[in-house]
Image (cartoon, rainbow, N blue to C red):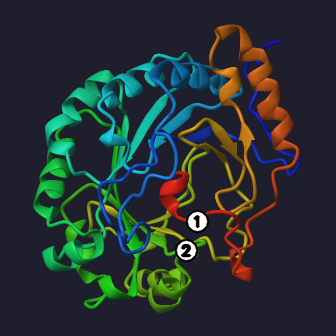
Amino acid sequence: MTYPGAVAADTFGRRFRYLRLSVTEVCNFRCTYCLPNGFRKSADMDFLTVDEVGRLARAFADLGISKIRLTGGEPTVRKDMTDLIAVVAAQPGIEKVALTTNGWNLFRHVEDWVEAGLTHLNVSIDALDRDTFQRITGHDRLGDVLAGLERAQTLSLRSVKVNAVLLRDSLEDGFSAWTEFVRERPVSVRFIELMRTGDNKTFFENQHVSGKELRHWLESRGWTATVRGVDDGPATEFEHPDHAGRIGLIAPYESGFCDGCNRLRVTARGRLRLCLFGQGERNLRDLLEHDADAETLKARVLEALVIKPAGHTLHAGDPGDMMNLAQAGG
């Protein structure tokens, strides 16, 4: 059984062209909003192998996935990161290979990653002030991360973006520093509204800033929203004629946020997660050992989509069974 030209869909008519694939739960930063006490091993580190990732990517490509993003934890703690990128890029039908990283070793390796097939890069930078960056991440590495970002912008990547979590602590001077950052840089900075997880209730209550604040700030200063592509992530991006870059907003608490969902998630242990803030997962790993299991694997994914929920329940203070974002790649 094959699926030529097909795009997997759920019962709400949403079509899925984008896979977020976690390759590790490990992270070497201690971000206040995710792992303030650092990564703590809770099980064997038996994450997907390169061969398993290749079989998984091939099956999802057959189901219409054309973009795969490698996430973590921090994916680049894996020494075989270049091999992982290469095996995903080698699959017919995969047109975009993306990576989200905290940038800690970006300067050293980004050229190898691009040569292996990386096309899109997101770098997490939660503050442009050195002290604030260190306070949020637990590391004084802002200079290294910015140097890696600059090197990446000289390469043949089709897209280089910056991610920043919207936190009250990092907005002492508002958004002006960020709009100045993109005045001459052709890069998109996307603010991600802080989301409630199983272990951050108090932090969320103290630090959550509504995405509406950024939207109103931008619109009052002449920034206008752009049109999303079919395999873009959930960000709304804003542009301004006086700026080379863009400012984006990912606002999961806005009404209708889930209506246009176009992405699926697989954890570092090979489990399909239908919603980041949902309940339960569907095991795929038992079908990744042999190429002969590919058709059964695709059928299992399609069967799971029947029960994909219409949306999350974050508005009700319910993050599902998501304890922290490193658990499934955010």
Tell me the quadrant of the picture where the N terminus can be found: top right
Left or right, 286 with respect to 302, comes to left
Q: Residue at x 10, y 61 (%)?
A: 143
* Residue 197 image-quadrant placement: bottom right
Residue for badge 1: 323
- Give the residue type that dot 2 points to: Asp
Q: Residue at x 50, y 18 (%)?
A: 51
* Closest to the observer, 242 or 106: 106
- Which three-letter amino acid code belongs to the residue tagged 1? Met
Residue at x-position 52% and y-position 46%: 43
The answer to whether 287 is drawn above or below residue 100 in the figure is above
329 over 83 or under it: above or below = below
**Residue 168 in the image: x percent, y percent?**
38, 87
- CA separation, marks 1 and 2? 6 Å
Q: Residues within 10 Å of mark 1 (few under 14, many from 20)?
A: some
Residue identifier under label 2: 199
Q: Position of residue 26 (x, y in %)?
A: 40, 49
- Find residue 196 and report its horizontal and vertical position in percent: 58, 76
Residue 57 percent across, percent down from the top left: 57, 25
